[in-house]
Image (cartoon, rainbow, N blue to C red):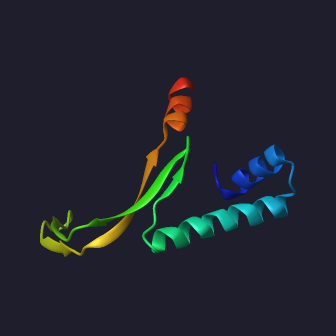
Amino acid sequence: MNKAELIDAIASSAKLTKVDAARALDSTVEAISKALKKGDRIGLVGFGSFSVTKRNARIGRNPQTGKEIKIPAKKVVKFKAGADLSGSVNKGK
């Protein structure tokens, strides 16, 4: 599902116009992004939680040449699915 399809699904489910659904989705993504930039954790009960963790610098290898390269430290976003989401995904099998 891409963004346009998600907007269509939100609009039909919430009985909103596509413009309003797009605005709501963009606002949600923006709010989550701002909170993660500040280092906050976002928990949506039943859905999951977003958090930021630090990945340490490490030595890797260029797969084409085999040379060692330095991979710098950076922050990464992690998502952990909640019990309800995991259950609904596994029920769908």
**Residue 93 seen in the figure:** no
Q: Is residue 65 above or below residue 88?
A: below
Residue 45: x percent and y percent?
A: 55, 45
Whether residue 13 is visible: yes
Tally of numbered discs = 0
Q: In the figure, residue 47 lies in which quadrant?
A: top right
Where residue 23 appears, as percent x and y from the top left, is 76, 66
Direction from residue 9 to residue 47 in the image, left or right: left
Query: Residue at coordinates 87% horizontally, 48% vertically from top-left?
Result: 15
In the rendered image, the vertical position of residue 17 relative to residue 23, given as above or below? above
- From the viewer's perspective, is 1 left or right of 70? right
Left-right relation of 82 to 10: left
- Which of these two is toward me, 40 or 29? 40
Identify which residue is drawn at 24% across, 75% down.
72
Q: What is the x, y in percent for residue 55?
A: 27, 66
Q: Nearer the viewer, residue 46 or 4?
A: 46
Instruction: Say which of 49 and 74 sits in front.
Output: 49
Q: Residue at x 68, y 67 (%)?
A: 27
User: Residue, x 37% and y 65% (percent of image)?
Assistant: 76
Image height check: is 50 above or below 74?
above
